[in-house]
Image (spheres, rainbow, N blue to C red):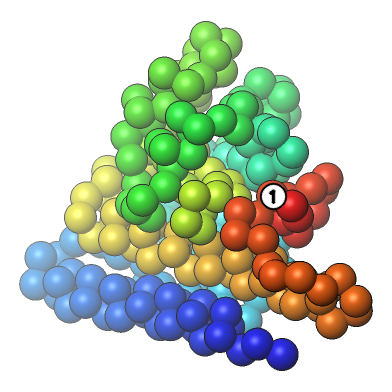
Amino acid sequence: MNIFPAVVISALVLSGVVIWRIMAERRKVSGESCFSDLGGTLAELARAASPAEATRMVMDVLGREGGVERIIYLRKHRRLLQADLMVGLPDEARREIRFQYQPTLVKSCTGSFSARAIIQLKSIASDRVWQTIEAHQFNFYVPVFWKDHVYGLFLLKLPAALAGSTGFASLSALAQSLSAVYHLHWQSQQVGNSAHGGGGALPSSPEPVGDTTRPAR
């Protein structure tokens, strides 16, 4: 079995822990609020049994420790990003908030794990979707991606305590580690398929199919 992907993912998770430690030192000086044990959370993410479990862990820490009142996680399903998990939202939001998976969306969600102002999604949202986003007062989004493939997207109504340099660094560390979990899961499945006779090289652009997180050609 090729252990290189796992080594790369472990390095990414470790880098997230390093970011958290730097951030914690800055907090001592600045007094800014931060998650109480983000380093522990990042380590738990690396041990998650599945991307779904890891995503729920991130949702929980955002709500419980980050004080984020409204969260929706949109997961890639075929050619859509559609609602998978929600906090503080009515059921109809699950049907109303979705994005077409298109090059402009990929461009808006890759390159950095940083939180971005929600206004950056306005040009790729339908009028109805944008009205719903504004109605629920989402102000930032955080992508979950690997290279040029977007696995999912968090829409957040961030409180003032997180809308600052330390909060953004926390969100970035969480997004980077969660992205690593998704990609490691995909790599593991591809290696398993190859071991059972699938053969061939791993596809460079994963594509989730159906209700799973397993990308395919």
Q: Which quadrant of the figure has residue 102?
A: top right
Q: Give above or below for 22 relative to 51.
A: below
Residue matched to label 1: 207
Question: Is 90 displayed left or right of 200 in the figure?
Answer: left
- How many circles with numbers are drawn on the protein? 1
Whether residue 52 is visible here, answered yes or no, is yes
Q: Residue at x 51, y 19 (%)?
A: 125
Q: Give above or below for 80 relative to 42.
A: above
Q: Which quadrant of the figure has residue 50?
A: bottom right
Q: Residue at x 33, y 40 (%)?
A: 116
Hey, which residue is sitting farthest left in the picture? 29
Under mark 1, the amino acid is Glu
Q: Position of residue 133 (x, y in %)?
A: 49, 23
Q: Position of residue 59 (x, y in %)?
A: 56, 55
Q: Position of residue 188 (x, y in %)?
A: 72, 76
Question: Is 68 displayed left or right of 60 in the figure?
Answer: left
Hey, which residue is sitting farthest front in the picture? 200
Q: Quadrant of the N terminus?
A: bottom right
Q: Check disc 1 and report its element: helix, strand or loop.
A: loop
Q: Residue at x 47, y 56 (%)?
A: 147
Q: Nearer the viewer, residue 61 or 77?
A: 77
Q: Position of residue 199 (x, y in %)?
A: 82, 73
Q: Give above or below for 109 relative to 61.
A: above
> Label 1 crowding class (10 Å Cα cut-off): few <14, some 14-19, many 20+?
many
Hey, which residue is sitting farthest right in the picture? 196
Whether residue 60 is visible here, answered yes or no, is no
Q: Residue at x 35, y 28 (%)?
A: 120
Q: Give above or below for 63 relative to 35.
A: above
